Amino acid sequence: MTARLRWTLADGLTLVGRELGRLRHDPGELVAALMFPAVMVVLFGYVLGSAIRVPGGGDYREYLMPGLFAMVTFSSVMGVMTRTAADASRGVMDRFRSLPMARSAVPFGQTGADLLVGLLMLAVMVGAGLLVGWRAHLGPAAAVQAFLLMVVLRYALAWAGVYAGLAVGDDRVADAMVPLFLPFTMVSNAFVPTGGMPGWLRLLADWNPVSALTAATRELFGNPGLPSGEVAWPLAHPVAAVLLWSAALLVIFVPLSLRANRR
Amino acid sequence: MPDPIVVAEGLRKSFGDVHALRGLDLAVREGTVCGVLGPNGAGKTTAVRVLATLSAPDAGHARVAGHDVVRQAGEVRARIGLAGQYAAVDEKLTGRANLRMFGRLSHLSRREAHRRADELLERFGLTEAADRRVAGYSGGTRRRLDLIASLIHRPEVLFLDEPTTGLDPRSRGEIWDSVRALVADGTTVLLTTQYLDEADRLADDIAVVDHGRVIATGTPDELKATIGDRLDVVVEDPAALGPAAAVLTGLTGADPTTTGDDRLSVALPGGGLRLAGVVRELDRAGVAAADVRLRRPTLDEVFLRLTDRTEPVR
Ligand SMILES: Nc1ncnc2c1ncn2[C@@H]1O[C@H](COP(=O)(O)OP(=O)(O)OP(=O)(O)O)[C@@H](O)[C@H]1O
Ligand SMILES: [Mg+2]
């Protein structure tokens, strides 16, 4: 292993430790982040769920959980973007750049820390899901594959977050962009079937990567609501679609982020 | 004389139409404090960012501690510290955790990073605040933490961009003491400021920057000497201000400025004036003077004269 790679890893780990330190000193942030999906389980599962009929039959909360898993996965873009933008606008990024550290450690540290946070959130979600009656029906191997898909896509999304944060460069702008997240995840099959949407919206929803991840995990968990008949390609091959999305995000945003970070 | 430890030659940097640096030359002697003075937008921060390897110049080159800031940026970074216009520390961590993190990122061993953090906190009187989160610090404490965070790897050259802007006088004094202590240890400091008294007190040499280039350099005394001494006159009756001004114009050939209800100040021409002569002339014009005194110009006066925006910039 070259010295350079070793330092990138070591510095990246230091920055992961930084994020964990922040969480330790400010547990409120983590609690808030964890409360959100839990509230969503209640809100959607019981309030809206009572009025929504799952296509092909089945329990709405079983239908809902993969959608919430997808939502939590996609939240990494926003989290990483706001944290990166805050570093950039407060001068912390400049300090990192003036240190003899490996520059690429900054995005690696940020995405690595997000992965840990993501695993924690997934664990809480699984607990909440089991409480409301959600189950993985196709055995542990398929369930593990579903979680791996989420983790892989989450990591790729975190790189998009790093780039967005560096490009925005101002935490107030980044904070103002966070509300866009909700409509983005809503225009998908995560909470309601796309069949009833007007044609143009359905097209957007079917090609939304949120839908691909939701469909993939529904398939792997054996949860209801799988599309039938003529459907868009990403929904017919959701696992492949998620892997392709992940690869595309990484291919695009890793080099872009590294370049923006070096500048 | 040994080679300067910071050398900039013909630095240029533009942001679209804005020419922030237009051929900036600078030299800082090792072990001294160089004060970079300039009005808002003069290019001070841009110059510091180039010297600290944060941005690459469009033209020109610079060497810091013997290394080129573009081609040997890594070598430069290992030898410099930077405290910018904002406190660049993680607000959600404690002061101690910040220092340890920056120590680790400067590639100190874990033990060394911890030791160095404790040592700096002790030395700069931050032990009491060390284990609280930075978010709860006062502005002055935050800046001091920022300053010591830039010292963690014992830099040879320290860049301080407006280290005391927005601080109360007591906090400013604390930062000044810290800077003096560093210089006593042999650290070279390049400091930008808009406070002239700060430069006057701390800097060995001053570079006045305007419109992206250095328009004057020298020790504070040398700069003061370039615009000559000043004559202050206080009259007993404010009504006599007009006649007094006429007398001073007659003697010096320059228009005095009114510095208060009952006082005037005027720049003296090269050779200077005899005080007795001034008193005699005022007397002759029937002006009762409460006080007449010669003094060195302040750095503010030098600065205003040098950066007078009404003069064309070449
Ligand atoms: N990243 C940037 N993009 C566009 N313009 C910039 C950028 N950085 C600086 N400038 C412009 O370059 C000029 C010099 O800015 P600089 O920040 O170096 O001045 P300064 O002397 O530090 O001023 P101040 O005393 O206000 O801090 C200004 O006109 C500023 O608006
Ligand atoms: Mg500035």
Image (cartoon, grey):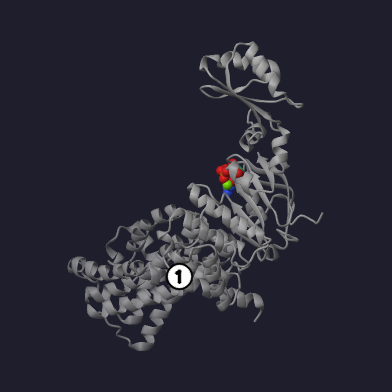
Identity of the residue drawn at 38% across and 88% down: A141
Instruction: Give amino acid for label 1.
Output: Glu
Identity of the residue drawn at 53% across and 74% down: B114
Does B253 sit above or below residue B205? above
The quarter of the rendering in which ligand 1 is drawn is: top right
Which residue in the structure is indicated by mark 1?
A19
Quadrant of the rendered image containing residue B135: bottom left
Does A256 sit above or below residue A237? above
Q: Position of residue B215 (x, y in %)?
A: 71, 39
- Read off the chain for label 1: A
For residue A256, say whether it is visible: no
Quadrant of the rendered image containing residue A171: bottom left
Q: Position of residue B72 (x, y in %)?
A: 72, 63
Q: Position of residue B142 (x, y in %)?
A: 48, 57
Asked whether mark 1 and ligand 1 are closer than 8 Å, the reply comes as no
Q: In which quadrant will I find the N terminus of chain B?
A: bottom right
Specify whether A217 is left or right of B156: left
For residue B130, say whether it is visible: yes
Q: In which quadrant will I find the C terminus of chain B?
A: top right
Residue closest to the eye, A12 or B92: B92
- The total of numbered circles placed on residues is 1
Residue closest to the eye, B171 or A80: B171
Alpha-carbon neighbours of circle 1 within 10 Å: few (<14), some, or many (≥20)? many
Q: Position of residue B59 (x, y in %)?
A: 73, 49
Residue closest to the eye, B79 or B14: B79
Quadrant of the rendered image containing residue A201: bottom left
Q: Residue furthest right?
A: B1
Identity of the residue drawn at 65% across and 39% down: B210
The secondary element bearing badge 1 is classed as helix
Residue closest to the eye, B119 or A56: B119
